[in-house]
Amino acid sequence: MEARLRWYQWLGMRIHLLYCVWCRRYASQIRFLHKACGGLDTETQANPSHTLSPEAKDTMRARLQEAMKDKPPPPQ
């Protein structure tokens, strides 16, 4: 999702997403995780230990809760 697609790749993806509910759901989940975890890279680079610090856990928890507020309920 980071790389830019060529126009024909983008068009093919958009056409596929029109009819594939599973890929739309997956893309939505990826956007959610990207938003919820934004900025955590810089924190983990500063502290290269293998476990998360309590502050990082609190930050992640707060970001997930904030992102969940904007998220509509999943379709049934």
Image (cartoon, rainbow, N blue to C red):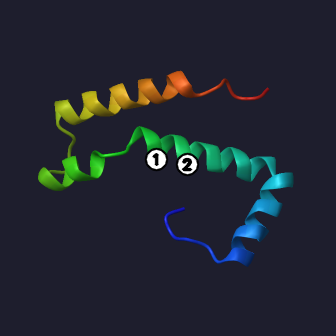
Q: Where is residue 21 in the image (x, y as percent from the top left)?
A: 80, 47
Measured from the top left, where is residue 37 in percent x and y?
38, 43
**Disc 2 on helix, strand or loop?**
helix
Q: Residue 55 carries which label?
A: none
Up-down relation of residue 31 to residue 8 (above or below): above
Say whether marks 1 and 2 touch (CB < 8 Å): yes
Q: Indicate the quadrant containing the C terminus: top left, top right, bottom left or bottom right.
A: top right
Mark 2 closeness class: few <14, some 14–19, many ≥20 residues within 10 Å: few
Seen in the picture, residue 48 relative to 76 is either above or below; the reply is: below
Nearer to us in this view, 63 or 22: 63
Residue 48 visible, this orientation: no
Left or right, 36 with respect to 45, comes to right
Q: Distance between the residues labelled 1 and 2?
A: 6 Å
Amino acid type shown at disc 2 = Ile
Q: What residue type is labelled 1?
A: His
Mark drawn on residue 34: 1
Residue 55 x %, y %: 18, 31
Q: Which residue lies furthest to the front in this view?
A: 7
Task: Estimate the x, y position of residue 16 in percent, counting from the top left.
Answer: 81, 61
At x 78% / y 70%, what residue is drawn? Answer: 12
Q: Which residue is drawn at 51% across and 70% down?
A: 3
Against 27, is 53 above or below? above
Secondary structure under badge 1? helix
Q: Who's the residue at 37% across and 45% down the image?
A: 38
Q: Is residue 13 above or below residue 24?
A: below
Instruction: Check disc 2 and report the residue beneath it.
Output: 30
